Image: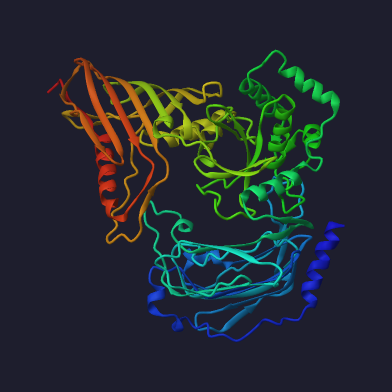
Amino acid sequence: MLRLKRIALLLFIIAVPKIFSQDFNFNIASIPVELKENANTVILFEDQKVEIHSQNSMTIKFKTAITVLNNLGDANRYVTVYFDKNQKIKNIETIIYNASGKEIKKIKNKEYNDVSAVDGGTLYGDNRVLYYKYTPISYPYTIYYEYEVETVNTGFVPSWRPISSYQTSIVKSTYQVSSTNKLKLRYKEKNFEGFKVDKNPTDFNLKYELKNQQAIKREPYSPSLENITPKLFVGLYKFNLEGINGEATNWKEFGKWRYDFLLNGNDELNEAFKTKIIELVEGVDEPIEKAKIIYEYVQGKSRYISVQEGIGGWMPIKADVVHKVGYGDCKGLSNYTKVLLDLVGVEAYYSIVWAGSKKSMEGDFFSMQGNHIILNLPTENEDVWLECTSQKVPFGYLGDFTDDRDVLVVTPEGGIIKHTKIYKSEENLQHTIGHYEINNDGSMNASVKISSHGTQYHDNLLEKDGASPTDLDVSFKQYFSNINNIKFSNIKVINNKENGSFDEELEFIASHYASQTDSEMLISVNAFNKFSNAPKRIRNRKLPFKIASGFLDIDEVKIKLPANLTVLHVPDKFELENKFGNYTAELIKVDSHNYIYKRSLQIEEGNHPKEEYENYRSFLKNIRKYDNSKIVLKKSNL
């Protein structure tokens, strides 16, 4: 049946005459010179019109032409239009032009691909995308396309974000919304300062325009464009999602609607299973201890798989279904865990978050926001947050996927905006304890233990949990890329969920670690954790910069030197401290051929003005320089 629906959709598109195609001047010579500067692409025009006919009827018309100047702009060669059973594509047209503006290809309906809009791990779903990918034969080229869609989902009024990528300039971008006089518009302007945006907003009509916007060049440590460029949020007080009407004036009321909607039978479990769950926590009174037992039970029983069904992918599958099949997505697993926690008397709430790059809910503008679900457990001391999709992370651990951002917590009384855990730099600890011995031929015998905490306990490390010996060998050779010719004799990784750490233990040998001349041997002191990420110099920097995550590295390494060589030089103690962090490194002499290397590097998260970039760069360059310090030994046969 679903396949027949897809065929019917494409036949419908084919049957509709091409009513949008027009003649435009797409000759690259017509683009102003200043708009080509620092640009990989130029948006010649982008026109989005939203027509709200009723609480459950909206039309979106979109038209754009983008000139791709070089292969770095090829991300714009895709045409993508999302649809599902409640969002129908009415018209679509795509035409490709060469550098002189001559039409070279008009896309036929059969050339569009109709595929699932969700990932390959999806169990089932009704969200789909019609897309076309152009394969360039020369540069520059212009891709022009337009489409029209109709939807019942007025809860998702498209926003306007004209500057959505670095190295892209804009000749003209326009955005218009018109609403029936019974449905008043809500809107919020963000980051408009410093941009020449023409606007004419009213209660029922919005019109915004940005013209002749030069490309913004990406610079090292550039902030997210979303945080520094214009964005317009638009919504309704009365809206519809997949046939379900809603009405709200704030996050509290919106959250109450979400809560009432989420119940809807999704919290039902059979009585025999309820009895089993209650028995799991028998004799345990402390709520957090109960929560840990339930969390570990869910981790052991279930696994994550994407499920995109129901209200635009917002409806969790029922708790009893997750229990029977043993899998679910973030919505289903979070709802399932919440139902079990409720059953044993632990307060827990479904919470919506923007996961990935750090992004908060707009606290003063309610709408369907977020892309992930976690749980909130309020306690007397602090909130505990649970990531319910991972079988590997410790209880109460979020990491940089969902830390330090505003989220919507859905309670029976309504929605509450809360902030997730902020990891201080010293909590994001990597502690390295090691030993290495240098032999007369310059080879190294080494052992090292690395323990990672906080946001340094991350997905890349968790991938090692259960990895094959071959994959571990490759991974650690990449990590110790400054050491050539490594041969591991022991690799052990331990996901220590109880302590909230990931522990790695290694033993290896490496030939030619020390470099030699006829008279001397040179040994790089920092073998196990060398810093090398000093950014390049930027003349006339334009943007502020962001240190995305703070951390602390503490290293303590015993070093044994060849007994028949004489120590000529060891690096002096070096200390550096400023607003960006601090660094200390020293070699402590034990005896004539044994030393202890102690190093501490702490970087603080933060946003900084462009004028301070060179100071930060200098700070990192000094760290890199001292991390490359060497011990110099004299050969005794001279």
| Residue at the far left in the pictured view | 638
> What is the x, y in percent for residue 298?
70, 28
In the image, taking residue 428 as reference, residue 442 lies left or right, namely left
Where is residue 589 drawn, in percent x and y? Answer: 21, 18
Please, is residue 588 above or below residue 265 in the view? above
Residue pictured at 77% horizontal, 73% vertical: 13
Indicate whether 216 appears above or below 44.
above
Which coloring applies here?
A: rainbow
User: 39 and 610: which one is in front?
Assistant: 610
- Residue in the foreground of this view, choosing between 56 and 68: 56
Quadrant in which residue 105 is drawn: bottom right
- On the image, which quarter does residue 281 sit in? top right
Classify 605 as above or below 499: below
| Residue 455 placement, left or right of 239 | left
The x, y position of residue 456, in whole percent, is 46, 34
Q: Residue at x 66, y 47 (%)?
A: 255
At 82% across and 65% down in the image, what residue appears? 7
Quarter of the image with the C terminus is top left
Q: Quadrant of the N terminus?
A: bottom right
Choose between 520 and 353: the one closer to the eye: 353
